[in-house]
């Protein structure tokens, strides 16, 4: 019902930057919160940043001041600008959207397939 397609991952040296994008498509009536999570090998998936439809943002402490989340509501797209990357930022980054689809009266969470971010030292 809702498909999330991420792009922008890759390999970068420490101190470098990457910009992730995630476009939502499908039978979408509205999207509430969109966010980015990450999961490193052996670790649980953790919140990186989230943004409401009104633009309110929330960041994990470990990315504050380095990452910026934004969204384009007209395009159902969320972005994550990642600066000053560190080797410990290496993980698979997943997009998440809390959306209401046509024919439903409740919001549900949807996930993208993930994009690998690798930061070399």
Image (tube, grey):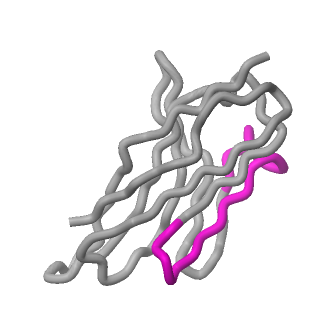
Q: Is residue 68 left or right of residue 48?
A: right
Q: Residue at x 27, y 71 (%)?
A: 26
Quarter of the image for residue 120 reads: top right
Quarter of the image for residue 69 reads: bottom right
Query: From which residue to which does the magenta span run?
Result: 59-77
Q: Is residue 43 above or below residue 64?
A: above
Q: Position of residue 33 (x, y in %)?
A: 48, 68
Nearest the eye: 54 or 116:
116
Nearest the eye: 103 or 21:
21
Q: Position of residue 13 (x, y in %)?
A: 78, 26
Q: Is residue 94 above or below residue 79?
A: above
Q: How many marks?
A: 0
Q: Is residue 67 left or right of residue 94?
A: right
Q: Residue at x 73, y 38 (%)?
A: 62
Q: Is residue 64 magenta?
A: yes
Quadrant the C terminus occupies: top right
Nearest the eye: 21 or 63:
21
Q: Residue at x 70, y 44 (%)?
A: 18
Q: Is residue 46 left or right of residue 83?
A: left
Q: Is residue 7 magenta?
A: no
Quadrant the N terminus occupies: bottom left
Q: Position of residue 36 (x, y in %)?
A: 54, 50
Q: Residue at x 84, y 50 (%)?
A: 65
Q: Position of residue 16 (x, y in %)?
A: 81, 36
Q: Is residue 39 above or below residue 20?
A: above
């Amino acid at each position: 019902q809702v498909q999330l397609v991420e792009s922008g991952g890759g390999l970068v040296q420490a101190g470098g930057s990457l910009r992730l994008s995630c476009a939502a498509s499908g039978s979408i009536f509205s999207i509430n919160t969109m966010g980015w999570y990450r999961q490193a090998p052996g670790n649980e998936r953790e919140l990186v940043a989230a943004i409401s439809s009104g633009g309110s943002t929330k960041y994990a402490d470990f990315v504050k001041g380095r990452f910026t989340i934004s969204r384009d509501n007209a395009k159902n797209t969320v972005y994550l600008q990642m600066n000053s990357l560190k080797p410990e930022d290496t993980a698979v980054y997943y997009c998440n959207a809390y959306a209401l689809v046509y024919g439903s009266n409740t919001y549900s969470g949807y996930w993208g397939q993930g994009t690998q971010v690798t930061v070399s030292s």
